[in-house]
Amino acid sequence: MRCLVINLDRSPERLIHIGSQFSTLGLNFERVAAVDGRELDDAVLAMQPASKQWKRMNKAEIACFMSHRSCWAIIAEGNDAYGAVIEDDVFFSPSATHALSSSDWIPAEVGLLKIETFRQKVFLSRARVLADAARSIHALRGCHVGTGGYVISRNYAKRLLELSEAAFPCPVDHFMFDDEVPRPEDCRIHQLYPAVCIQGMLLDSADPAHGSTIRKPAGATVRVKPKLRIHQKLWRECKRLSLQAAALPPFLFRSIRYRWTAVPFG
C-alpha cells in the first residue's frame, strides 16, 4: 500500500521527523508537496461557496484541502486498491506497521478509514466491521476532526474528487470525517480503534513546534471579542442554554444507539 506524506517545501525539518517515524516502522513513503497558502492568490477564496453553516476558510485551509486532493488524485490514478495519506507532524504507534504495510486486512466495505485520533469523544457504531485481539473498525457516526492519517480506497478517492471538483464546502477534515456533512450513501466513514497515529500537538511529550503549518496562516491574529453589556450577556446565555436544551434529545438518542467514546492512541 502506497503511503503518501504531505509536506511543505518550507518545512524540511518536518520531513526529517516523519522520515524517522517511517524508518522506525520499517516502511517507505512518498512525499507529496503541499500547496502553500502563502503562495495562493485571493481568488482561491471563491472556492468556498457562501454558507450560513460554515465560516469562511482562509487561504491556508483551502491550501490544505488542495493538498489532500492532490493525494486523492494520485491514489485514484494508481493501481493499488488502497492508499494511506499522512500529514508530516504525526507520530505512529508500533501497531502502525501492520496497518500501513498492506491493505489486505481492511474489509471491502470500508472505503475511508481514519487511523488517527484527535483525543475527543466521538460517536462510533456499536457493531464492529472488523474485530481481532488488537484492533477493531467501527462506522463513524459523528464528527472526528483532523486529517493527520487515513487510509482511502481508490474508488472512494475518485468519489471525493468528484464531490469537491466544483467547490470546497467546508474544511477538509469536516468534508471527510463529519458524518453530518451531506454525502452520498456509498461514502461511509470508518474509524480504526485504537488509532495508530496522532498529531504531534496532541502528545504531551511532543515538541511544541509540531503544530499545523498548512492550516494556520503566518502571522494569524487572535480575534478580539467585543465587550458586552449586561443585557447582552444575559441574552447570550439564554440563547446558549436554549440551544443546549434543543440539542439534548438528539444527543441522548445517539448515546443510546451509538458508542460515545474517545478513540485511544496505541
Image (spheres, rainbow, N blue to C red):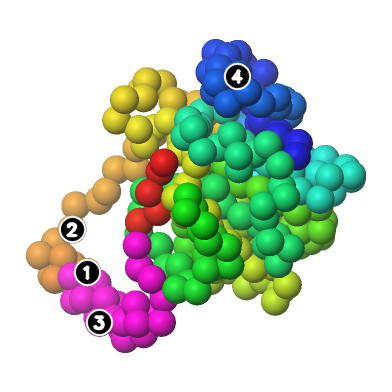
Q: Does the image show residue 58?
A: no
Outermost residue to the front? 133
> Upstream in the sequence, badge 4 or badge 1?
4
The residue identified by callout 3 is 245
- Circles 1 and 2: CB distance less than 8 Å? yes
Q: Which residue is at 45% across, 73% downward?
A: 126
How far apart are labels 1 and 2 at the CA level? 9 Å
Magenta residue span: 237-261
Left or right, 256 with respect to 147, comes to left
How far apart are labels 4 and 2 at the CA level? 54 Å
Outermost residue to the left? 230
Q: Which residue is at 89% across, 44% downward?
A: 79
Judged by its main secondary structure, the magenta piece is helix
Please state the horizontal and vertical placement of residue 204, each as a whole percent of the image: 29, 30
Query: Quadrant where the N terminus lies?
Result: top right
The residue identified by callout 4 is 23
> Upstream in the sequence, badge 2 or badge 3?
2
Please state the horizontal and vertical placement of residue 147, each as a whole percent of the image: 56, 45
The foreground one among 34 and 255 is 255
The foreground one among 153 and 40 is 153
How far apart are labels 2 and 3 at the CA level? 24 Å
Q: Amino acid at mark 4?
A: Ser
> Upstream in the sequence, badge 3 or badge 4?
4
Q: Which residue is at 62% across, 72% downward?
A: 182
Q: Of the numbered discs in the image, which one, if any, rests on residue 236? A: 1
Q: Of the numbered discs in the image, which one, if any, rests on residue 228? A: 2
Q: Secondary structure at mark 3?
A: helix
How far apart are labels 4 and 1 at the CA level? 52 Å
Please state the horizontal and vertical placement of residue 179, each as a whole percent of the image: 54, 68
Left or right, 261 with respect to 152, comes to left
- Image: 173 above or below 148: below
- Circles 2 and 3: CB distance less than 8 Å? no
